[in-house]
Image (tube, grey):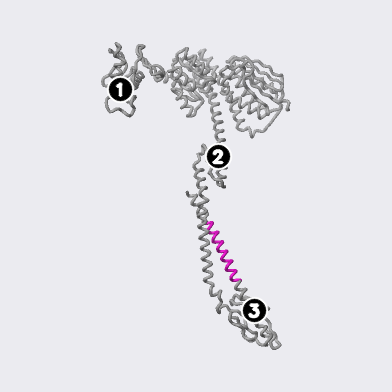
Amino acid sequence: MYYFRYFRRQVTLTFIIFSAFLSGLFSFLIWTTIESTDDQVREDLLQAQSQKLVANFEKTGSLSKIDELFGIQVLLENRDEIPAKWLALPTGIYEDNEEDTHLEKILLQIDNETRQVFLVHVPANGDVLDNNRFPVQLILTLISLVVTLIGSLVGILLARNLSRPVRELSIRIADTDPNQPVFEPLDRNDEFGEISDAFARTLLKINQVIEREKQFSAYVSHELRTPVAVIKSSLELAKVCREKHDTKASKHIEEQALSRMSIANTQMELLIETFLYLGTKNSLPAMTSNVDIAAILREKIEAYNKEYQIKGINITLDILQALPIACNEKMLELILENILRNTFSYCAGSISIVLKTDKLYIYNDIDQLRIDTAEHFGFGLQIVEDLCKSHSWSFSSGIGEQNQYLSTINFHRASY
Amino acid sequence: MRILLVEDNLELAGNICDYLELNGILTDHANTGKQSFTLIERASYDVIIMDVMMPGIDGFETCRQLRQRCQCQIPTIFLTARTDLEDKIKGFEAGADDYLTKPFAMAELHCRLLALHMRGKRQDIGELSFLDLKLNTQTGLVTRAGLTVNLNKIQYQILLTLIKHSPAIVSRDDLEYEIWGEDLPDTDILRSHIYQLRKIIDKPFTQAYIQTVHGKGIKLSIGNS
């Protein structure tokens, strides 16, 4: 409400100043016009009278008394008292502001002598304009005030009218929940409607970004909780085992706890690296080098096999001796880590990995339940797909031959 | 005490099993919800620890099916990475008795398991019984010595309260509150309902089960009809 009033005050003040300026300017122009018209009339009058005087002088040879209706006096050099400054003037029509008079200087040959003759108009004697100066000024001032007042009223009305959608807009904006920024635009076809539409669209985009961030945070939190739980429980278990004082069984359990902790730690490292990549992938430089994918793959398989040895997984490998590919080494590692982690985690018996010149195949025996509900462990695969896309590789996964789960990466080497 | 752990993460499952067994608790492990049905049919458990995100049927659905379809009375605790309030509500609505989020302290899990075990089986699920008197909460069927007994709504409510609390004494105030809540009747109508219930449950048989303990309330125990 305060802003609305402030806005109205601002608009009203603007209209008052603007109207006052306009009406003042208008009055000034009118006054100037009247004044210049008055001067012109006097000058014309003087000119007419001087012509009349000259004509009469040429005709009669004497300076007869001219019509003094308009208070025009005829002053002759050496006869009448004439201010020195007038005498210094060349012939012509002048306005003497000090004396508030208009005069015209002419030269006449009187008695073989050139003498200066002045026709002087003295306004004090019945000048219409001077007599009506105050009423005219008063009328003009009143007109200015009325125009200013009307301008202010129009300003208030316009301010009210203009501020209505602004007020509605500001109320809706103030009511918008920052956690769920959804905004209903104003149902208007004018500029305010366009502004509110644009604002609603922007908020919708912001909302989508917030939702995506929330989901990502929830996913990260969820994915990290399990390995953290494993590490924490392993530590507690190891501590309990140590308190049991070296029984054979507790020693064995302690070793298993440490092994599980190692697996969870590896998973967590991988998750963190992947999340960091996903969080900054747009700003990562696309540094590529010639990387031997076969060597990295063998190294990773060996590491995972060691970690998951308690599952007794049967692994078959058909991997080329060496397969150099131009790619970002870190991203390749993330891809292989994610895909192998899924493979080993969900393996129910055997894994077969085949690396050819342009493709990597990973066959995995997972139980039927897991095949039916592949979406439950699809987060890692989604990440693999995103990472592959960043290299223009393609990734696919699904049920392959003999009811095995098959993951394939096509490196598109033909395009290199 | 015997525990059933339903968890698809082998590392976490291994740790929990080892920890509980070191504390003298027998633990069986199921990888999936479906496996848990098989194990529950085969063996008797005191408490179930259930993960939520599992392949196949998730933990919520598994628990729901155990309660509704199998009328499983075993107290169940959810152990999950899902920490949202919505998930917790979903868990309890599915029939959970407790909810613990990952990461957790093993000692806390242990304490919660002991507490659930002490509390005993769920009395609001499946068939409740007192000797040969049986009451099925799902079907509403009441039998004594194999004979079906027909009860009206209030009589059923009285019997259900007495069986749930047996062998403890239930005060008249508690009984009235169970039946009518805050809107208590003006007259002593409870006495009349108990009289009718005795006529139906006890009179045809030699032993009376509904006993009045003067000054304290009513309980189920063996007496002469």
Q: Nearer the viewer, mark 2 or mark 3?
A: 3
* Relative vertical location of residue A338 with respect to residue A36 in this rendering, above or below: above
Residue A384 location, x and y as percent? 63, 26
Residue B118 in view here: no
Q: What stretch of residues is rendered in magenta?
A: A13-36
- Closer to the camera, B197 or B150? B150
> Residue A381 at what x, y percent from top left?
61, 25
Q: Are marks 1 and 2 in contact (CB under 8 Å)?
A: no
Q: Chain of mark 3?
A: A
Q: Are marks 1 and 2 on the same chain?
A: no
Q: Position of residue A367 (x, y in %)?
A: 57, 16
Per the image, is A251 magenta?
A: no
Nearer the observer: mark 1 or 2; the answer is 2
- What percent of the width, then of the height, locates residue A280? 62, 33
Discs 2, 3: same chain:
yes
The kind of secondary structure element at disc 1 is loop
Q: Which mark is residue A203?
A: 2
Q: Nearer the viewer, residue A248 or B171?
A: B171
**Residue with the mark numbered 3:** A48
Q: Is residue A14 inside the magenta stretch?
A: yes
Identify the residue position indicated by label 1 in the image: B171
The chain containing the residue under callout 1 comes to B
Residue positioned 64% across, 34% down in the render: A283
- How far is the residue under mark 2 from the one under mark 3? 80 Å
Q: Label 3 sits on what residue type?
A: Ala
Does residue A414 show up? yes
Tell me: residue B82, above or below residue A46.
Answer: above
